[in-house]
Image (cartoon, rainbow, N blue to C red):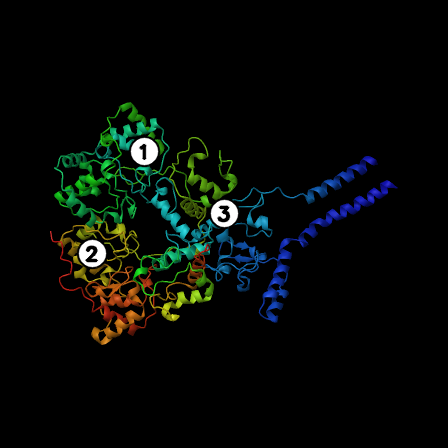
Amino acid sequence: MPLKRLFAISSLLFLAVLAISPAKNALRPYRSFQRRFAELGAVRAKSQKAAREYEKRPVAIRQIWLREFDDRVDRCTTCHLGVADPLMQDAPEPFSSHPRTAHTPEGFERIGCTSCHGGQGLATSEQEAHGTAADAGPPMTPAAYIEAGCGRCHGGEAVPGAPRLSLGRTLMARFDCYACHVVRGQETFRSEAPPIETLPLKTGGEWVRRWLKSPRTLDPNATMPDFHLSETEIEELANALFARPVPDGLARVIRAASGEPPGSAASGKKIFSESRCISCHTVEGKGNGSAPELSKIASAATRGWLLAYLRAPHSFNPRTRMPQYGFSEAESRDVVAYLEEEFRDFEAPKEILDPLRPNQTVAERGEKLFQRLGCFACHGPASGSESERFGPTLDGIGDKKPASLDFGKRVDLPRTLPAWLAAKLEVPRSFAQGLRMPSFGFSPEETRAIATALLALGSEPVPEAYRHTVKRPPAVLPGGETGKLLDRYRCLSCHQIGDRGGDLATAPLTYEGSKVRRDWLVDYLVLSTSIRPVLEERMPIFRMSRAEATRLADAIASFWVDAAIPEDPFAGKTASEADPREGQRLYGELGCRACHLIGDAGGGYYGPPLTDSADRLKPGWVFTWLKGPQRWRADVRCPDHGLRDTDALRLTAYLGTLKAPTGAKAAGGEK
Amino acid sequence: MRTAAASWLATVVLISAAGCARRPAAPAVPAAPAEPSYEMRLGRDVYRHYCQTCHGETGAGDGFNAFNLDPRPRDFSDPAFQKKKSDAELADAIRRGGSGVGLSPLMPPWGRTLSTQQIDQAVLYVRSLKKTSP
């Protein structure tokens, strides 16, 4: 009976179909992974007993349950069985042990896996867990962006062990991302970009056209992006900028300065180099590069403007990091004469600084464009405090689902968040017509770094217990006359004080009063000698008066001291009892001369020369520093030798004998 | 009867087909840009910050501070040196410095300044400085 036979066969088939599901479970890859891991462990185990331990482990789902991290459950260790197993260092995947990081292997139980790597912790199949299956949740973070995980818990700009994340955060501030985009914690951010109120008296129409066309072509240090403006748009914006009224006070100063007689370029050259302009600016690429390139500055700004700006930069841009030097009228004329002689664009047309006569109709269109492009976000008026942030908020961008992203015209991109972010940063307007975000010209590494920082911006903050931001002590900042001096010389542009200030200088001022001798400091402020000649970023000679220097030195001596640094490390005994000769022997034995130079005895150029250390440094500081340099500056290269107190005192006593030969001391630039 | 049997068969075939069908393949995740591993990057940063001044950018022992030093800093690009020393020996020299391993004290001991991990990362990077072409 063929029909009966057909029924029999189909019943058997049906039975087989029913068995598929349990069979699939029994054959799930993690089971074979666990069996293979047991075999591998047994082979690698150092003892019979340890081998049996591997074999005895039951085949089962394994998980890390993070009760305090929103009850997160990570089952990654179901397959990644060797992550915490030192025997599995070079084992094949998925068994290899986790690279050592600040959190591994110690932190697995507290941090789990997905908090850093992303992906689906609950899943137990590779495709679902890694998020490569079409219907899986957000996928794992690719290795290139792994430091985004660090940024979920670690706030602040610099995160140790996460250089890419740290770079990304630095770049986001440097390129003014926060001026247009809302990001939690950056509400008070203001761009340092100059207000453009004095532009009609600063430069010419042709320069503005060139600048708007491509800022980076004119100045490689420029942080202003390329807005891909058409010739018409450039003309409209240029007209608008030249149609704006220049504030009366500044206009008067600039016009008066432009009528002054020219100064001496030779004298200006000397002042320029003493002023250490390249500590921030560059000249033909040489210098720090956090401020504009100067080699063509005289073809970008008029003589009157340069003079007026040099004399009072803060009245032009209150947000600038540039200090106000104490140049006399004649000295500033000399500096500008030097700039005009040397720092010109010899290929530029001679009318580059000719003012543009604005056409009102074109200018009005330009004003609208100025608003539409959001130029005001960075170039707000000097007096304004807050500007509207019109860009989309970036909080939560790291948790966006690929399906919610608009890839627009970019059909070439993989449908992933990191790919989308990287493309947005590289060619922002390639996604659709009419997008406003400009191009910043980021390098591939910069793009990766910023994408990492963006991926760290989750929609919800991690639980309180997991949040970590290094807190520096709050800055003690005096007011009154001293406060005015700090502001005038912009000490905080380069030096850290407590939780404030930049990091251009190697010396934080937080404990400077416990570190250097007051008399030395007065001389140094008046006429700074280079403590580290190998650096491009050196302390400028501000041409401050001795009275100002004394006031600052007194404030430093009284405000910025640290109780952990004793005034007298010898506790009442004399330094000679600590045996400076023994100290000198130690100096040789420890190899200090590899980096430090002492007068004619020579030595390396890397650390500060110690020739006059007795004049400069307080013994209590030397002693405390020697006991652990990294306590005072975490990344300092002076190695911690783990010195005993007696040896540190001997070295302190030796350095206490090193005085500059008399007559060689700074003469003091009295004015 | 024949129709019933045919539809029964069709159902069975459909069910089994559904059970066996694979999920549609996911779009490819972008291949991570070819670049050094996380540990190698950290090792490179440690090297650049602490070692490069004397040992030089390429590890040839020609950093800008090297000319002050006698004996000269070790040349890491030298394949013979790389072959002679084990990872543990390199890490030990970094940790205890020149005087710790019977060499010049001008190489400082970094054991109290760098963590074990940082030293291992630095060794990893130093290994990558070996000159490959003769």
Residue under the image location 56 percent in, 55 percent down? A76
Instruction: Judge whether residue A573 can be spotted in this image.
Output: no
Crowding at mark 3 (Cα within 10 Å: few <14, some 14-19, many 20+): few
Read off the residue under disc 1. A212
Q: Using the image, determine if residue A371 lies above or below residue A170.
A: above
Marks 3/1: CA distance? 35 Å
Q: Please, what is the three-letter code of the amino acid marked with disc 3?
A: Ala
Judging from the image, what secondary structure is the residue with disc 2 in? Answer: loop
x then y, percent, for residue B33: 48, 47
Read off the residue under disc 3. B32
Determine the chain carrying the residue at label 1: A
Q: Using the image, determine if residue B40 lies above or below residue A309.
A: below
Q: Nearer the viewer, residue A185 or A177?
A: A177
Judging from the image, what secondary structure is the residue with disc 1 in? Answer: helix
Ranked by sequence position, the earlier of labels 2 and 1 is 1
Marks 2/1: CA distance? 40 Å
